[in-house]
Amino acid sequence: MRTMSIGDLHGKDLWKQIDINNFDKVIFIGDYVDSWDIKDEDILNNLLDLIELKKIFPNKVILLLGNHDIQYLFFPNYSCSGFRNSMLYSLEITFKENIKLFQIAFQEQNYLFTHAGISNKWLKKHNETIQYYKKTFRCKDLGETLNLIFETKDNKILHEVGYARGGSYNNVGGVTWACKKETIQSFPYNFHQIVGHTPIDKILKIKSQDNNSSITYIDCLDKKVEFFKMEI
């Protein structure tokens, strides 16, 4: 399966350079909104274009949610930098009306795509909750379990803000909020993660010594127009 992963857009329409037909899956890593220099109208139109793309290619295009998207969807629970009060109503409505087109995670075999990534510390802290949903609803993998949790009252664990990002000392960064400092130190064994969230100069892949685990950071579009291509 030929995949293309696209880092945090923040209103950019760079994705329109891609020929969708050349890939089996095109995975957007989240954070479609909030920008320091792009106009409200352009941010909203870009998001609407992405939603339309998903409708045209429902099985090929994957739209993951990031913390900047979550802050409008669940306002005022998860505030972060770049928030635009002028867009609160339009973005809240847009995300809520199209929520079924978005998801928290995508997993194919042992390749796991989320916005910010998963650390062993977060998995350990919330293992009881994760295992409950996985076993009770017979989820096939971690990705499916995370998507299920997003639809429940326990979805707050996905958006936990760790100490590295301004949360309390006891918090561990969740799937939409984990900092690179958290995930790079301890990423789960036998998973190959692809994540955004933490700005970098270019795509960066960190591997375990035995190559059975890795995490690839792709939030580089502020510095370099680079998309992550991979065969699964």
Image (cartoon, rainbow, N blue to C red):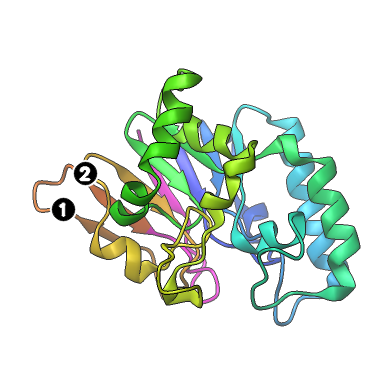
Return the x and y of residue 203 as percentages of the image width and height: 38, 64
- In depth, the one of 187 and 198 nearer the eye is 187
Residue in the picture at 52% in, 35% down: 25
How many marks the image carries: the answer is 2
The residue depicted at 48 percent of the width and 29 percent of the height is 133
Closer to the eye: label 1 or 2: 2
Residue receiving disc 1: 208
Q: Is residue 64 left or right of residue 166?
A: right
Question: Helix, strand or loop at disc 1?
Answer: loop
Q: Quadrant of residue 112?
A: top left
**Quick one: quadrant of the N terminus?**
top left
Numbered badge on residue 4:
none
Q: Position of residue 4 (x, y in %)?
A: 48, 44
Residue hosting label 2? 189
Vertical order, 109 against 206 (above or below): above
Report if the CB atoms under discs 1 and 2 are less than 8 Å apart. yes
From this viewpoint, is residue 1 visible? no
What amino acid is labelled 1 in the image? Ser
Label the magenta part by its dominant secondary structure. Answer: loop
The magenta-colored residue range is 217-232
Q: Quadrant of the C terminus?
A: top left
Q: Is residue 59 left or right of residue 49?
A: left
Q: Amino acid at mark 2?
A: Tyr
Based on the picture, tell me whether residue 222 belongs to the magenta stretch: yes
Q: Pick whichever, 177 or 192, lies toward us.
A: 177
